[in-house]
Amino acid sequence: KNYSLEQNYPNPFNPSTKISYAIPSGARNLVTLKIYDVLGNEVATLIDDYREAGRYEVEFNAENLSSGIYFYKLQAGSFVETKKMILLR
């Protein structure tokens, strides 16, 4: 019924984690899901495409990244939400 961005699981993770999100019924939006480092540099784009209403899950593999705190941001229509995740090696 509403847009949502779930906390990644597992968190902390090594080297991959899953990120779930939902798009409400009646919506078809350009969805972007990007990963940023603690300095705000974009390190990955997981989604940059149109999505129909529904629940989705995406896997993020960080095998080429160093340990630390990262942020993932979902943008869909006017909805924007950011959450924190921790990569532990």
Image: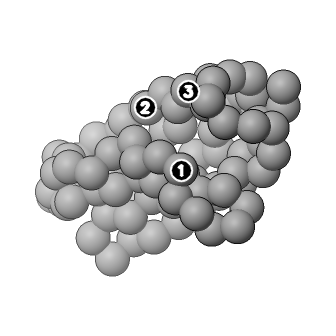
Q: Amino acid at mark 3?
A: Asn
Q: Secondary structure at mark 3?
A: strand
Depth check, front residue: 43 or 81: 43
Mark 1 highlights which residue? 43
Q: Amino acid at mark 2?
A: Glu
Mark 3 highlights which residue? 61
Q: Secondary structure at mark 1?
A: strand
Quarter holding the N terminus is bottom left
Mark 2 highlights which residue? 57
Query: Which residue: 75% across, 37% down?
Result: 66
On screen, residue 44 versus residue 55, left or right, reads right
Marks 1 and 2, the one that precedes in the sequence: 1
Q: Secondary structure at mark 2?
A: strand
Place of residue 54 in the rendered image (x, y in percent of width and height, measured from the top left): 28, 41
Quarter holding the C terminus is top right
**Circle 1 crowding by C-alpha within 10 Å: few under 14, some 14–19, many from 20:** some
Separation of marks 1 and 2 at Cα, in angstroms: 19 Å
Depth check, front residue: 63 or 4: 63
Q: Are marks 1 and 3 in contact (CB under 8 Å)?
A: no
Question: Where 55 sits versus 41, above or below?
Answer: above
Query: Which residue: 38% across, 64% down?
Result: 75
**Circle 2 crowding by C-alpha within 10 Å: few under 14, some 14–19, many from 20:** few
Marks 1 and 3, the one that precedes in the sequence: 1
Residue 9: quadrant of the picture: top right
Question: Where 12 sits versus 83, above or below?
Answer: above
Q: Amino acid at mark 1?
A: Val
